[in-house]
Amino acid sequence: MKKTKTSYLLRGTPSILLVLGAGFVMASSEDLREALGMGAAVLISMLLSSIVVSAIHKIIPAYAKIPAYVMIITGFVTLISMLMKAFFPEVANMLGVHLAALAVSAVVYRDCEEVADHSGEGTTIKTALVTGVFFTVIMVVCALIREVLGNASIWGQPIAFLQDYKISALAGAFGGYVVLAIVMAVINKITGLHHHLDENEEKEGN
């Protein structure tokens, strides 16, 4: 039986992203602006890198694919970093070295190696968009929890009535781990439920 669009979108992507991108999620989710900046950088670099890899993967020798893909990703990440420093300097400063580290991120490389290296441009673009959007959503959710509850602010602006109730630990490294664990548990529950529903549909179809 044909799977639903929802189950297709949720198929393994969020939970895998949380593991591969845990460092970026924890390091860049203390502020909503920071989270959106990193999410946009991941989405754009993943999309552009995947398109290029999909177009030229057949002419790259097997032994040269890893360094070639890393160079392609690094080029786009450097371009994004330069543009972000020019037009969004505050966000670029907030991201700091984590933006440069995106060049060797398993999140982006996985998409290039597993999808773009074996698929046409259509599938590559679709997968990169879905993966990038999911990563951005995860970043935003974590940032909203940590900034609102941890710093009692939103988009850098203080929330007056929460100042006496903020949980400062959520804004630190420990809070990053706690929020990430909670989000991962919720996502695993949702994806597990959809997987169970798909199995039941397949059984009924047979």
Image (cartoon, rainbow, N blue to C red):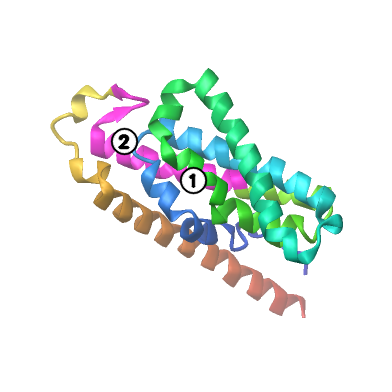
- Look at 86% across and 58% down and name the residue there: 58
Image height of 176 relative to 149, above or below: below
- The x and y percentages for residue 205 are 76, 75
Magenta-drawn stretch contains 150 = yes
**Which of these two is toward me, 173 or 155?**
173
Residue type, mark 1 in image: Ala
The N terminus lies in which quarter of the figure? Answer: bottom right
Magenta-drawn stretch contains 24 = no
Task: Estimate how packed mark 2 is, as few (under 14), some (14 to 19) or many (20 or more) residues with alpha carbons within 10 Å.
Answer: many
Instruction: Kindly indicate whether the residue at mark 2 contacts the one at mark 1 (C-beta within 8 angstroms).
Output: no
| Element assignment for label 2 | helix
Q: CA distance from mark 1 to mark 2?
A: 23 Å
- Look at 77% across and 45% down and name the residue there: 52
User: Left or right of 105: which side holds 45?
Assistant: right
Q: Which mark is residue 109?
A: none
Which residue ends up furthest to the left in the rendered image?
164
User: Left or right of 180: which side holds 203?
Assistant: right
Which quadrant of the figure has residue 22?
Answer: bottom left
Q: Which mark is residue 101?
A: 1
Q: Main secondary structure of the magenta part?
A: helix
The C terminus lies in which quarter of the figure? Answer: bottom right
Q: Which mark is residue 147?
A: 2
Q: Which residues are magenta?
A: 132-157
User: Left or right of 54: which side holds 92?
Assistant: left
- The x and y percentages for residue 106 are 55, 56
- Disc 1 vs disc 2: which is toward the camera? 1
Residue 202 in sight: yes
Residue type, mark 2 in image: Glu
- Look at 53% across and 47% down and name the residue there: 135
**Which of these two is toward me, 10 or 15?**
15
Task: Estimate how packed mark 1 is, as few (under 14), some (14 to 19) or many (20 or more) residues with alpha carbons within 10 Å.
Answer: few
